[in-house]
Amino acid sequence: MKIQILGSGCAKCRALTAVAEQAAHDMGLTYELEKVTDVKRFADFGVMFTPALVVDGAVKVSGKVPSLDETKKLLI
C-alpha cells in the first residue's frame, strides 16, 4: 500500500502523517509513506485543500485531519 500525504509541512500535515502512520501500524499494514510538498503535484491529484491523504493513488480526504478511527476506514 502506498500512502501519500499532500501538504506544505504545516501542523495539520504533520498531524495527518502521524494519524495515518498510527492507523496503518494498528492495522498491521505494510505500507510506503511519501510526503508530497510540491504544490504542482497537488493539482495532479485534483487537490485544492491540504492536508490530503492519498491511498494507492486515490484521494481519500482533503482539507482536514480525520480521527484515528476514520483514518482506519479510509485505509481499507
Image (cartoon, grey):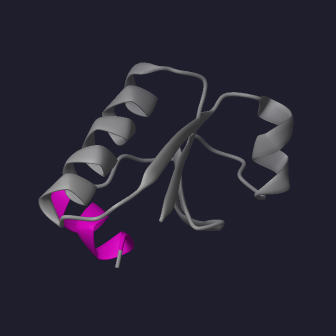
The image quarter in which residue 37 lies = top right
- The quadrant in which the C terminus is found is bottom left
Specify whether 57 is left or right of 54.
right
Is 66 situated above or below 58? above
In the image, farthest residue toward the left: 26
Q: Position of residue 23 (x, y in %)?
A: 22, 56
What range of the chain is rendered magenta?
Answer: 67-75
The residue that appears at 20% across and 47% down in the rendered structure is 22
73 falls in the magenta region: yes
Q: Position of residue 36 (x, y in %)?
A: 65, 35
Instruction: Determine if residue 25 is in view.
Output: yes
Q: Position of residue 19 (x, y in %)?
A: 26, 45
The residue that appears at 32% across and 33% down in the rendered structure is 15
In the image, farthest residue toward the bottom: 76
Magenta stretch: helix, strand or loop mostly: helix
55 falls in the magenta region: no
The image quarter in which residue 56 lies = bottom right
Specify whether 24 is left or right of 57.
left
Is 73 situated above or below 30? below
The residue that appears at 34% across and 61% down in the rendered structure is 30
Specify whether 28 is left or right of 46.
left
